[in-house]
Amino acid sequence: MINKKNPSPSDPREIMQWTRRYAQSRTIYFLVQWCLIVFIICIIGLVASLTQQAYTAGNSSLFYTSVVFLAITLFFFIWISISRWTAEVVWQITLWFYGREGFVAPEENARSKQLPRWVIILIGMMLVYHIWGALLISFRYLPLQYLQPFSAIILVPVLCILIYYQGLGFWAWLWPLLYGLHAFLLLIKVPIGFPSPWYLLNIMVPIFGYGLIAILAGHIYSRYALWKLKTITRQGLDMYGDGEYSEEKEDIKE
């Protein structure tokens, strides 16, 4: 007879649950993208600031030169965002980091393999929307301190749509949640903004700072999920290895 005191083996459903949570929280891919995008956006921000200063000073030659360079930089950013070459480089870096952990992609995340065309169009519209906002600021139709709430109008729903279709974990929702909350606090005059001449940080810090917080939260949770998965798996192996088998033999002898 089998010893009833012996605990039952790990539930396969629990193993699948933690595998899915681990897969949804592997964020190094997004961290590499974050670093690349921050670098390009910093260049765009510097050029936009130069454009505004040239327009304010009435330096037409410098202004038009800055506008042309800004357009080139923005198109380069778009190319980087949609280029297969960029995606491959980011993916290879990700595989190198997770080398010992291997590759995992639960079937529940199958919808993340290809975004619907309307979502891709929406991303393009979001980029155009932000370019429009930069031009409005350059010509002083939009106060710079309201750029972040202006951005949140479209960025928050776009982020939510991307998170849903990519099947990401809870950590990803922190980004639009914190970004939207920041915009609301600015609109009700809570003093959380940067003073002049650091107004550009009012858009740079929230969009990339909250993104980094979400990415790091996901990475930390993935470490916990991996530890939990290994623990459950070891318990199951020990149960089938030395524990249950040896106790069964003792019961049979009795």
Image (cartoon, rainbow, N blue to C red):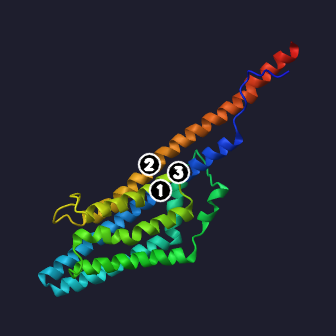
Measured as percent of width and height from the top left, residue 28 is found at: 48, 53
Q: Secondary structure at mark 2?
A: helix
How many numbered markers are drawn? 3
The answer to whether 32 is drawn above or below residue 219 in the figure is below
What residue sits 34% from the left and 56% below the top? 209
Label 3 environment density (alpha carbons within 10 Å; few <14, some 14–19, many ≥20): many
In the image, what residue type sits under mark 2?
A: Ala
Disc on the earlier residue, 3 or 2: 3
Q: Distance between the Cα atoms at labels 1 and 2? A: 9 Å
What residue sits 23% from the left and 57% below the top? 192
Q: Secondary structure at mark 3?
A: loop
What residue sits 52% from the left and 40% below the top? 224
Measured as percent of width and height from the top left, residue 128 is found at: 39, 79
Q: Distance between the Cα atoms at labels 3 and 1? A: 9 Å
Disc on the earlier residue, 1 or 2: 1
Tell me, for residue 217, which label it has, or none: 2
